[in-house]
Amino acid sequence: MAFFVKSMISNQVKNLGFGGGSEEKKEEGGTSDPAAAQGMTREEYEEYQKQMIEEKMERDAAFTQKKAERACLRVHLRDKYRLPKSEMDETQIQLAGDDVDLPEDLRKMVDEDQDEEEEKDSILGQLQNLQNMDLDAIKEKAQATFTEIKQSAEQKCSVM
């Protein structure tokens, strides 16, 4: 099989004009049959063409799926950050058959982010934020502000 593929590639390179000059002259004078030009039998050539078409279809399908996954991610981010929707992304998802989800690793990241946001928004999350605050610094700042207001009031009011 490797020899077959190697010979196919070398024949294609020769057909592009990168091969030796004498070989090009032989093929130009040869038959118009593409299988003979490739150095294969008719059955081998048909099988090769069929295989090439199948591989191209698989690549195209995988490419379309990846594009749809990316579009799905963009749609998700637009929803999350309340950005305007894109018709191009919606069309790409529809082309893939509406059976598109985020890739598994991105799905896990999104779920973790949502869990963190929900935790921060909950009452327990707010209480934890209070525990993380530096209460001494807040007390000092409040005391300094109170003292400053008191001094300002004493300067303005001569009765005190």
Image (cartoon, grey):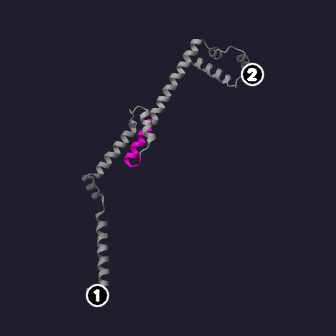
| Mark with earlier residue (2, 1) | 2
Q: CA distance from mark 2 to mark 1?
A: 111 Å
Q: Quadrant of the C terminus?
A: bottom left
Looking at the picture, tell me which residue is in the foreground, 102 or 87: 87
In what element is the residue under mark 1? Answer: loop
The residue type indicated by label 1 comes to: Ser
Q: Is residue 46 left or right of residue 74?
A: right
Q: Is residue 6 left or right of residue 72?
A: right
Circle 1 crowding by C-alpha within 10 Å: few under 14, some 14–19, many from 20 = few
Looking at the picture, tell me which residue is in the foreground, 89 or 114: 89
The residue type indicated by label 2 comes to: Gly
Q: Residue at x 26, y 51 (%)?
A: 122
Q: Position of residue 51 (x, y in %)?
A: 53, 20
The label on residue 134 is none
Residue designated by label 2: 21
Q: Quadrant of residue 7?
A: top right
- The secondary structure making up most of the magenta span is helix
Q: Position of residue 131 (x, y in %)?
A: 27, 58
**Which portion, as a residue range, is magenta?**
68-84
Magenta includes 49?
no
Q: Is residue 47 left or right of residue 150?
A: right
Vertical order, 59 against 31 (above or below): below
Q: Quadrant of residue 138?
A: bottom left
Circle 2 crowding by C-alpha within 10 Å: few under 14, some 14–19, many from 20 = few
Residue at the extreme bottom: 158
Magenta includes 81?
yes
**Total labels drawn:** 2
Q: Residue at x 67, y 15 (%)?
A: 32
Residue designated by label 1: 158
In what element is the residue under mark 2? Answer: helix
